[in-house]
Amino acid sequence: MADWQRQFAENKITISPQDVNLPDAPKSLQSSQIETALMTVYMVAGIVSVIIIVLGGIRYTSSNGDPSSIKAAKDTILYAVVGLVVVIMAAAITDFVIKNVVA
């Protein structure tokens, strides 16, 4: 088993301050810290997606029947929904891996 696999299996990934070029960098990360960081990123991405969906809805209602504005608003909503689905799937996969594979 490779060294990184052993560290990963022990829920402990060690990094040196030289690796990240930060003198006050932490010496190691626990899986709970990684999970917290990733879930925070996913939550922010989900909130941004919902805001974009709302903005797309506002663009749609204020398009005044202009076909190009309606299409742009629909595309905005569609892309934001796809982004939200990707974020939800990434969060689910990450949660599964951290709780079942790493633990």
Image (cartoon, rainbow, N blue to C red):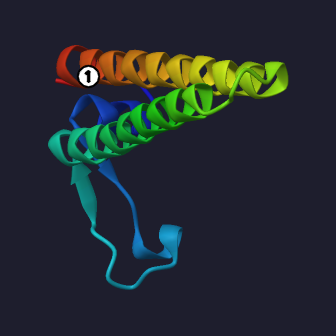
Residue 14, image x, y percentages:
33, 55
In what quadrant of the picture does the N terminus appear? top left
Q: Is 19 situated above or below 30? A: below
Residue 32, image x, y percentages:
16, 41
Q: Is 15 situated above or below 85? A: below
In percent of the image, x 21 and y 34: which residue is there?
10
Q: Is 25 situated above or below 45? A: below
Residue nearest the viewer, comparing 7 with 50: 50
The answer to which quarter of the image holds residue 4 is top left
Residue 70, image x, y percentages:
72, 21
In what quadrant of the picture does the C terminus appear? top left
In percent of the image, x 57 and y 22: which residue is there?
77
In percent of the image, x 44 and y 80: which residue is there?
22
Residue beneath label 1, please?
95
Q: Secondary structure at mark 1?
A: helix
Q: Is residue 42 left or right of residue 2?
A: left
Residue 38, image x, y percentages:
33, 41
The answer to which quarter of the image holds residue 9 is top left
In percent of the image, x 68 and y 27: which residue is there?
64
Q: Amino acid at mark 1?
A: Asp
Q: Is residue 88 left or right of residue 101?
A: right
